Image (cartoon, coloured by chain):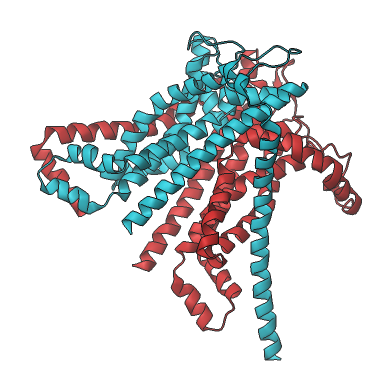
Chain colours: A red, B cyan
Amino acid sequence: MDLSLRTKRLSRNRNLGDSIFYVITLFFALLILVLVVVMFYEMYRSSTLTREKFGFGFFLHSVWDPVLDEYGALPFIYGTVVSTALAVILAVPLSLGIAIFLSEVAPGWLEQPLSFFVELLAAIPSIVYGLWGFFVMVPWLRTSFQPWLSEHWNFLPFFEGPPYGIGMLAAGFILAIMILPIIASISRDVLRAVPRTQYEAALALGATRWQATRIALSYGRSGILGAIILGIGRALGETMAVTMVIGNRPTISISLFEPGYTMASVLANEFTEATSEMYISALIEIALVLFVITLIINSIARLLLWSMTRNSKDVRL
Amino acid sequence: MSMIRYYLRRYFSSFMFILCAFSVVIALIPLFLIFYHTVSLGISAVNVDFFTKLPKPVGESGGGLANAIIGTLILVGIGSCISLPIGIFAGIFLSEYGNNFVGQIVRFLTDVLSGIPSIVAGVVAYTLIVIPMKHFSAYAGGVALGILMIPTVTRTTEEMLKLVPTSLREAALALGISRWKMTLRIVLRTALPGVVTGILLSIARAAGETAPLLFTALNNRFWHTSLNQPIASLTVFIYNYGVSPFEEWVQQAWGGALVLIVMILLVNIGMRTITLNRMKGNQ
């Protein structure tokens, strides 16, 4: 921006209004920076009690007993990790398929509405997913899908126990639906940013269209990885939909039919009931962990995506 | 032999693309099911009473969620008062002065902030406002929503301002107008429809949030008399009613979900038409 530099230099000498305006906008922009720091500090400060009492053991103990003031977050961490992993396993192949279809195959008249529908999936509020999951998906899982799984796949330890419907599997399913549009739409943009020369070169060497697409995928791998990590970040912190279908029981079980509990859903369920200071501190520490993890995960994702768009611009020029 | 391999490769290629098309179909099934169930289960609950009456106690039929709808509007209003000034001015900064290190940092943090779980914003509002005030209030809920709205407003404002052609800025500056007037009167005004839809988008999103309100705004079954007390919201009512064992409450929860979905559909269609028109205009 040569223009911006020159005008800024001019304005500094000439116009008080410009300087004031610049300072105002800078102030509000820096406010965002301050906000992130304040968020961290507030939660750090408010979780002092449990941080000092339990230390790192907080994350390794699986007893969560508000009556005895014993707090260990392991079941919640386990539930969060497993439900997220399940969601990613289900969502990634589907979203890559969608991204490829939208960017490579679909003609313009079809691509526009399909993209809109996929993005609409991201706009539906979490609570509506929860309601739908609770009243439509969970009964379907209980009566059809889980009996089928335990009949044909019972040699796997994941599908043991009675089919409640509600449980880890339901949470993984609903999360998969929710993160799918994010991964799909960003991967689609990444694939579009791959230079056409990559395809043309592959096609000219005799590759089929699928083989050319695979080359495009590997060209855009850092961007696609960024999209997947962004999806992981969303799944980790998703609250309402998961709370309504996961069963909310702090147990660690290998079977996906069993109920579980996640970090976000324990916050949603127990915050208003928390009476003792220690209880609130434990919950805030969970929120702090969630904040820090999603902060790190989103930073990685953004850096990957930025490196991708920057590279593609270089190639285009 | 090589011909066979050639055909195999061709068939494999087609097969994979068919799988891709299939994955689109699979992804759209839940979307249409959600719309179908929300409309079919919710439509019977949405009537005049739904928008004008207070919730009835258990056992009495009828009643509506009027206080919750107004509560959501109030909460989103407070959230907007916090997030719009910050978001719009930060967006102006990023678009007009943001091509440097500070701009990159702020842009990065804004993107990262948009990925923070909404319930964390609720916890922050709780520690900031509920603990010192010692009770739940509309202010706390509004602050939580405000935190969540900031990234969307900032980034859409920036994107929309950047779509304004440089020639327009140059023309304005060449006529001797000062830079800040150029930004507000020419650039912001040109980008206004886009900025407004960005704001609407963030409002729609905030109106659909539940988690940050659970322990900040809490809930309330009566009309609101003060911002300093717990306040009802549509989404928290959907949650409470949805997990309740009473059939009529569940039906009203679906009605609330229908209201939310229709609102979000309208805003998204509006956003899409505007950005499409913009992009066409620029080409």
Q: The C terminus of chain B appears in which quarter of the rendering?
A: bottom left
With respect to residue A214, does B135 lie above or below?
above
In this view of the protein, which residue sits in the foreground, B95 or B49?
B49
Residue B12 rendering spot, x and y as whole percentages:
68, 75
Q: The N terminus of chain B appears in which quarter of the rendering?
A: bottom right
Residue A305 rendering spot, x and y as whole percentages:
47, 54
Residue shown at 68% from the left, 24% from the top: B252
Residue B232 in view of the camera = no
With respect to residue B248, does A230 lie above or below?
below
In this view of the protein, which residue sits in the foreground, B6 or A133?
A133
Residue A31 rendering spot, x and y as whole percentages:
35, 30
With respect to residue A108, does B77 lie above or below?
above
Residue shown at 54% from the left, 67% from the top: A104
Residue A70 rendering spot, x and y as whole percentages:
71, 21
Relative to B22, B152 lies left or right: left
Hey, which residue is sitting farthest front in the picture? B48
Residue shown at 56% from the left, 16% from the top: B67
With respect to residue B212, does B133 lie above or below?
above
Q: Which quadrant of the view contains residue A265?
A: top right
Residue shown at 67% from the left, 90% from the top: B2
In this view of the protein, which residue sits in the foreground, B155 or A234?
B155
Hey, which residue is sitting farthest right in the picture? A151
Residue A296 in view of the camera = yes
Hey, which residue is sitting farthest bottom in the picture? B1
